[in-house]
Amino acid sequence: MILVTGGAGFIGSHTCVELLNKDHEIVIADNLVNSKIASVEAIKQITGKSCLFYELDINDEDGLRALFRSHDITSVIHFAGLKSVGESCKFPHRYYSNNVGGTLTLLKIMREFSCKSMVFSSSATVYGRDNDPPFTESMPTSATNPYGWTKVIQEQILVDQAKADPEMRIALLRYFNPVGAHPSGLIGEDPVGIPNNLVPYICKVALGRLPYLNVYGNDYDTVDGTGVRDYIHVVDLAKGHIEAMKYLDNNRGVLTVNLGTGIGYSVLELVDAYSRASGKEIPVRFMPRRSGDIATSYANAEKACELLGWKAELGIEDMCRDSWNYAQKKM
Ligand code: NAD
Ligand code: UD1
């Protein structure tokens, strides 16, 4: 059985759907700090299959131990973590404690039960600001904020753990910018309050709940001066996890791999695509650059293709269409 930590969240719920579609047995552990139990119901509705759910904080060592005692967990897909950059700057201790502490507790319990396989949610944020895109996995890592540092540190912990135990199988998946939603419109991303990230913000503007999009910076050295990112459809991303798990079945040690499309779009290009998909005008207002942002981020996506046989199949139109479908149904 596969343990999915953070499986009620945005990327986790989509990955649970793909796992169930492939007939894997799964158990979700999520404390619902940034998700709702409704997404677990939606996973069941989409797949017509059942999955177990524990409302559990992964920092709760006894609770995690009890879960491992009750189920034969052979591998873990570890999404659980806090992910807001701004919040991490205000509350660094909370971020280090939840993210790094959670991973340490999880590793401890995995060791107790001889569970040796983990797929970990890392981020393109570990490329920091000193590398030139396209980002390749061998580049040095760093971060510009506490959230980013939790990813750099968790990667290091997992690498060291694998060095110490040659039977470990670890996949560090560096996601670029996950967007979109399941085509059913039943699961997607709906952050609480005013969104920080681009696509959820655009959704609210298209729905008429916010008057315009603030575009942070139009003087970058990019196609139109606005920031460029590698947006990836969350369903493609979810499928990448299935391929990473398969890879770990046959390979020990650490796999570090980018999950991106290899293509960058500017903020204005994305706004245009979203406007076409939704048939809504998205008014924009140019603002100064957002602190901590880099001009351009996109993946070299070759390694995932070579080692996992995985590449993103959905394009920007699919991302905008599915995001808009979800926004209308659920936001
Ligand atoms: P999300 O917030 O929707 O999902 C994370 C889930 O983990 C939530 O359901 C939350 O309730 C749960 N959680 C948090 N702390 C927990 C704890 N201590 N115990 C149990 N559950 C806990 O976020 P997401 O976008 O689905 O991201 C999943 C993972 O991918 C995170 O680790 C995130 O840092 C990483 N990631 C996300 C992005 C992105 O843009 N969404 C990019 C790169 C990496
Ligand atoms: C951000 C985080 C990153 C994290 C990711 C997923 C920062 C610096 N980086 O990535 O660490 O892994 O979210 O949670 O916060 N933009 C606007 N207006 C908006 C929102 C965004 O113009 O209202 C622009 C940004 O300046 C950027 C692009 O849109 O150029 C994408 O922004 P966003 O969706 O927040 O993602 P990242 O900043 O790439």
Image: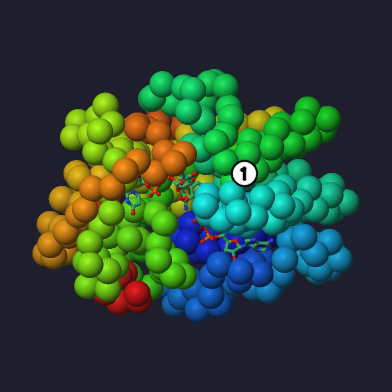
The answer to whether one can see residue 62 in this image is: yes
Residue at the outermost front position: 288
Residue in the picture at 66% in, 31% down: 254
Q: Relative to 213, is 277 on the left or the right?
A: left
Relative image position of residue 292 (x, y in whole percent): 46, 39
**Where is residue 242 shown, x and y percent of the image?**
52, 48
Q: Kindly tell me whether residue 76 is visible in this rendering.
A: no
Find residue 80 and report its horizontal and vertical position in percent. 63, 57
Question: Is 148 left or right of 96, judged from the image as shown?
Answer: left
Q: Quadrant of ligand 1?
A: bottom right
The one of 330 and 113 positioned closer to us in this rendering? 330
**Quarter containing the C terminus:** bottom left
* Quadrant in the picture for residue 262: top left
Q: Quadrant of residue 133?
A: top left
Q: Residues within 10 Å of mark 1 (few under 14, many from 20)?
A: many
Instruction: Read off the residue under disc 1.
Output: 146
Identity, as a three-letter code, of the amino acid under mark 1: Pro
Side of 187 where 94 appears, left or right: right
Q: Is residue 291 left or right of residue 270?
A: right
Secondary structure of the residue carrying numbered label 1: helix
Judging from the image, the colouring scheme is rainbow
The quarter of the image holding the N terminus is bottom right
